[in-house]
Image (tube, helix red, strand yellow):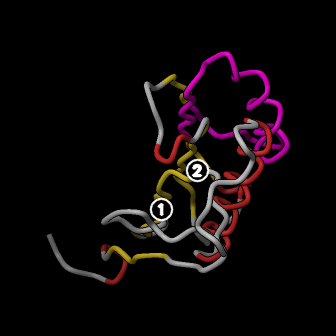
Amino acid sequence: MSSSASARATAIHTPEAPAPVGPYNQAVQAGELLFCSGQIALDPASGQMVGGGDVEAETRQVLRNLEAVLRAAGSSPALVVRTTVFLADLGDFAAVNAIYAETFGEGVSPARACVEVAALPKGARVEIDCIALVG
């Protein structure tokens, strides 16, 4: 396999989204694809959870964080092709889905999976990751 600029992976970082809480990047760009790590409702400035357990407030912050990472890489919600939504309680599906549609409901919505999980980092109720096109 030849080594070329388009085949290299590039880490994406922006102070407009929370710093990673482990050994990973906010996103990695590989060619024209951007792989965004999962975001929870952390405030980028303080690193503290926002929403006080309100899944709607958490979802809005999660989407703000994802949008910041997308912008930092030269992408946008309109270029997202795949998301995964992780919920601590599948009973929150309708509330999360309504807010999710505000960001991803126009044009071609991304392919998506939504799963209930036993727990999320820092007691979050929702986490979303995505894959997007760049450029």
Look at label 2 and name its amino acid: Ile
In this figure, which residue is indicated by the disc labeled 2? Answer: 40
Image: magenta residue range: 83-112
The image quadrant of residue 118 is top left
Q: Which of 134/101 is in front?
A: 101
Residue 99 placement, left or right of 129: right
Marks 2 and 1: which is nearer the front? Answer: 2
Q: CA distance from mark 2 to mark 1?
A: 22 Å
Q: Residue at x 46, y 58 (%)?
A: 35
Where is 60 relative to 118, above or below? below
Which quadrant: the N terminus? bottom left
Question: Residue placed farthest to the left in the image?
Answer: 1
Q: Where residue 34 sits in the image (x, y, percent)?
A: 49, 63
Image point 61% across, 18% down: which residue?
90
In the displayed structure, would residue 86 be above or below residue 38? Answer: above
Q: Residue furthest bottom?
A: 5
Name the foreground residue: 2 vs 107.
Answer: 107
Position of residue 3 measured from the top left corner of the image (x, y, whole percent): 20, 80
Does residue 113 appear left or right of residue 97 in this picture?
left
With 112 as the anchor, is 117 left or right in this view?
A: left
Residue 23 locus on image (x, y percent): 30, 66
Q: Earlier in the sequence, mark 2 or mark 1?
A: 1
The dot on residue 33 is: 1
For mark 1, give the secondary structure: strand
Towards the viewer: 25 or 82: 25
Please name whichever residue, 34 or 121, is drawn nearer the observer in this view of the structure: 121
Q: Looking at the picture, which amino acid does disc 1 mark?
A: Leu
